[in-house]
Image (spheres, rainbow, N blue to C red):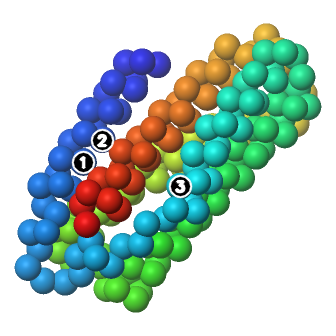
Amino acid sequence: MFSLFASEAAIFVIFIVAYLFYAGKSVSGPTASVLHAPLFLTACLLSSSWTIHRAVAALRRGDVGSFARSWVATIVLGAVFLGGTALEWRHLIRDEGLTVRTNLFGTTYYSLVGLHAFHVTVGLIALATVALLTAGGHVKREHAARIDLLGLYWHFVDVVWIAVFLVVYVVGR
């Protein structure tokens, strides 16, 4: 798992460097000034680290009911984040005219934020799979170590968002 994190971190670093390198170099079209920091969405995603931590802790105790509730809360928070990202993109495309083809800013913005959204989507699919297995009675205390690995992935996605958020919505503006 840590090898996966290292390789994924390297990919994100490349995308972040590209974003920073090209920020402000577009001579036409919208720039980073059209972005609005998604504070509520960020709070949802970061809160999901707490709920997944609670879920894993509950499963380690053998409390499958508490596990399931916290696990579903994690899915809801992640889905709100992803849905909010989609709404942000719709606004940028429709109202601001910012697409991947518009300029270098659009290309690097959608590439970086899209890469993160892809990782959130993969995580949500994995989380939903575990939720379905839990609903079917197939998740038990002895699965806690495996579930913890998925929790580590989710924490990784959250930490990466902190970096992306700071670069895109704070530094890169």
Q: Which callout, 3 or 2, points at the residue further toward the start of the chain? A: 2
Q: Is residue 56 above or below residue 121?
A: above
Q: Most extreme residue toward the top, as rendered?
A: 142
Residue 12 numbered tag: 2
Q: Most extreme residue toward the bottom, as rendered?
A: 95
Q: Secondary structure at mark 1?
A: helix
What type is the residue that disc 1 sits on?
A: Ile
Image coords of residue 105 (percent x, y): 21, 68
Number of numbered markers: 3
For the residues marked 3 and 2, what is the alpha-carbon distance in whole angstroms?
A: 18 Å
Looking at the figure, which quarter contains the C terminus? Answer: bottom left
Answer with left or right where residue 95 lies relative to residue 138: left
Image coords of residue 52 (percent x, y): 68, 34
Of circles 3 and 1, the one toward us is 3
Which residue in the protein does label 3 denote? 42
Q: Which callout, 3 or 1, points at the residue further toward the start of the chain? A: 1
* Residue at the image point whose x is 38% and y is 81% from the top: 93
What type is the residue that disc 2 sits on?
A: Phe
Tell me the crowding category of disc 1: few under 14, some 14 to 19, or many 20 or more residues within 10 angstroms, Cα based.
many
Tell me the crowding category of disc 2: few under 14, some 14 to 19, or many 20 or more residues within 10 angstroms, Cα based.
some
Q: Is residue 80 above or below residue 90?
A: above
